[in-house]
Image: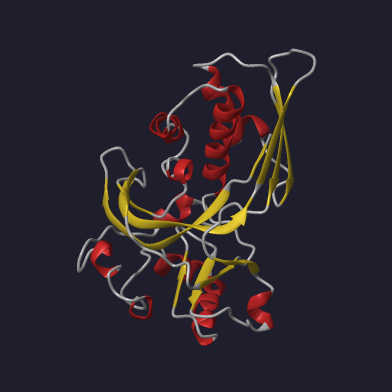
Amino acid sequence: MVVFPSAKINIGLRIVEKRPDGYHNIETFFYPVALADALEFVVRKDNRRHDTLRVTGLMEEVDAENNLVMKAVRLMRQSFDFPGIRIHLHKTIPVGAGLGGGSSDAAGMLRALNRYFGFGLTPEELRSFAGRLGSDAPFFIDNTPSFAEGVGNILSEFPLDLSSYHIALLWPNLNISTAEAYAGCVPCHTGLSLRQLFNLPVSEWRGRVVNDFELNIFRLYPQVGRIKMALYEAGALYASMSGSGSAVYGIFREEPVLPHELSRYLLNTGGLT
């Protein structure tokens, strides 16, 4: 069975407060984009209950046992009995880019196992499983535009439609850990909420819909900030770093023709997957 777990971008991200458990409450908007990994599994013919994972693409050297895909399989085995499987994950979503690739792969594995073996789990039950693998993993079960709160796990529908725009997604070949990103941030919750700001037209988001990670990440990695500004110079209505970085995207009214210094970082263009 083959599935194609897709990436997401964060449109705005506010770090609201630090929680007693050490995590942070945030508010952000998750939006799926046309960039996906390929995830395939086949049932072992030798009837062994041993699972294996091979990874190719952007992430060839991995600790397979600690990969979120394998964690998803082991989690399902706690509740269901099914044969051993051989898994192949081909990565086109970069790691440490703020695009949710690992969580999307995990959610894709849960959905694929549920469908192939007929476990009968509802979307709500799948989201519960996914929440044990990553704070943003529940989003990828339904993979529809959602406003996210808490640690990114409290989702609600929000009528934001960007299908008439073009999204250019760029990655400067940097891997930024979430821990590194949070280390330089101070929680602050002032001004209009993101929910209110999203009622504004996209052309008015610049300077209002902000990502609280940008200030520290741009200080540590100036090239990320330069890419954002270059997207504006190329005509983007709105540009931002996604999540904790390092990917940056621009929203354009028409399909952009990017200069070479930007196009060499291009991952994909488009809207919804």
Above or below 209: residue 183: above
Residue 71 in the figure: left or right of residue 53? left
Give the position of the N terminus as an image quadrant.
top right
Above or below 101: residue 204: below
Residue 241: x and y, percent? Answer: 47, 66
Residue 87: x and y, percent? Answer: 71, 32
Residue 132: x and y, percent? Answer: 43, 31
Above or below 262: residue 179: above
Q: How many marks?
A: 0
In front: 121, or 229?
121
In front: 156, or 249?
156
Q: Residue at x 40, y 31 (%)?
A: 128
In front: 152, or 251?
251
Q: Residue at x 58, y 78 (%)?
A: 255
Residue 70 in the figure: left or right of residue 14? right
Give the position of the C terminus as an image quadrant.
bottom right
Q: How is the image coloured?
A: secondary structure
Q: Residue at x 65, y 49 (%)?
A: 37
In front: 22, or 208?
208
Q: Residue at x 66, y 76 (%)?
A: 263
Residue 243 in the figure: left or right of residue 104? left
Residue 245 in the figure: left or right of residue 267? left
- Most extreme residue toward the right is 46
Above or below 265: residue 229: below
